[in-house]
Amino acid sequence: MNTANLPHRTRRTGRAIVAVTAAAALAVGAVAFGAWSRTDGAGPGAGAGSESALTDRLQDLVDAGYPAALASVTDAHGDHVDVAVGEGDIESGDTARADGEVRIASNTKMYVATIVLQLVEEGVVALDEPIETYLPGLVAGEGIAGTDITVRQLLQHRSGLPEYADQVAADAFGVQDVYIAPRDMLDVALEKPAVFVPGERWEYSNTNYLTLGLLIERMTERPLYEQVDERIVKPLGLQHTYLPVPGERELRGEHPLGYHLGDDGELRDITTMDPSFAWSAGAIVASPNDLNAFMQALLNGELLSDAGLAEMQTTVPAGDELWPEATYGLGLQSYPLSCGGVAWGHGGDIPGTQTRNAVGPDGTAVTVAVTALPWAVVDMTDEEKLLEQYRIVVDVLDETLCD
């Protein structure tokens, strides 16, 4: 999903990518990370820092088929530029509004990981303690034992837990108005055997963060949406960030419509949906500027101690043949930039929205969002075209950070 998504594969076909994104923007592993390559040959500082240059980049995304593109650039001092291009509503032709709310999918994992690490700092949870300690008897199945899987392994996608989202959210319109309880989704995953022995390797699975959501609720004895609000949203003064409450389907603030491919081959509005299938793996809503503010606060040490942030930024290789240098920490990804240096962020895909975002070496944060997934606007059977449709969004992020 980069909202709850599917497992990362060593080799991912177009349909595998589709399955992942269909899981609700839970940034499916590989598609969400990577060494970014620019395609226009422009060098760092080639006018890209201006609003007009950013607008031109977003227009390129709209010209490539995305209904609308939004971006927010926030410098290290908090000054920001918000831009939107394209149609926020295809039917009416209304233009997209800058800094509108979008479903940020698997970016949710950064927020959930932050809360877990806060609980670690409070002495409530230990990173290297088995999940069985906190959720006794819950994580069990064929080759799966909660006594063998640590909290750290869940945060870093090294648990071997099988994916739930490929089944639960494979039909985006079919689950659009369906509420699915977290425990029911976990049961779907645990019907499958373990993918590998815990700690053996890295492989993206939204089930890890579904389990971490349950951990947070068990240890705080409060709902996850409240913990997101009390621990992150209110302290940072975010105005357009929230985890929808159970049953909530409408976006609360101004927003562009998100579109998904219908059975008739036409784009259909999928903005209003029950995001329960994504929950702690990818259901948070935010505006691009709010997402920038969160990432900057996290990396500036406003939400975690230096030790906690260091744990979060301790990574393992998480690349593939497309992005061999990508790494994954505890809910946080690192990517090498084309102009040098490393950026930190995540990314997310959910029916109706693709988001790419990170903070560069100089503290500048950039979020780019488009209002459809790649395979909603290009032929999903053309793997190269599909991957290119992902790359062009990542290129905008890279180019802007390199300015």
Image (cartoon, rainbow, N blue to C red):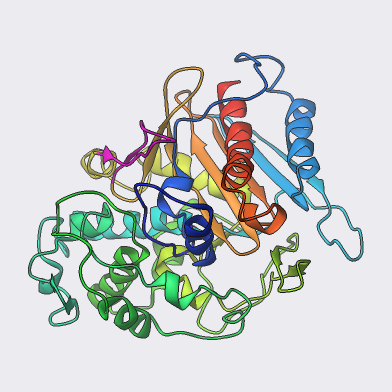
Q: Where is residue 371 in the image (x, y as percent from the top left)?
A: 70, 55
For the question of whether residue 145 can be seen, the reply is: no
Is 143 left, or right, of 396 in this rendering? left
Rendered residue at 15%/73% (across/down): 134
Q: Which residue is drawn at 61% across and 84% down?
A: 177
Task: State which quarter of the image contains the C terminus.
Answer: top right
Q: In which quarter of the image is residue 352?
A: bottom right
Q: Residue furthest right?
A: 92
Vertical side of 180 occupied by 206: above or below: above
Q: Is residue 130 magenta?
A: no
Residue 142 appears left or right of 254: left
User: What percent of the width, then of the height, locates residue 222?
Assistant: 34, 78
Q: Give left or right: position of 77 versus 163.
A: right
Seen from the viewer's position, the closer of residues 400 and 306 is: 400
* Magenta-span inclusion, residue 318: yes
Which residue is nearer to you in this view: 357 or 244?
357
Toward the front, the furthest residue is 381
Residue 71: image location, x then y, percent: 67, 42
Taking depth in this image into account, of 355 and 174 the one nearest to the observer is: 174
Q: Residue at x 26, y 78 (%)?
A: 190
- Count of all numbered marks drawn on residues in the image: 0
Q: Position of residue 365 (x, y in %)?
A: 54, 35
Give the prevailing secondary structure in the magenta stretch: loop
Front-most of residues 236 and 281: 281
Vertical placement of 1 versus 218: above or below?
above
The image quarter containing residue 64 is: top right
The residue stretch that appears in magenta? 315-329
Q: Which residue is drawn at 62% across and 28% down?
A: 400
Residue 276 seen in the current view: yes
Depicted 360 relative to depicted 83: above or below: above
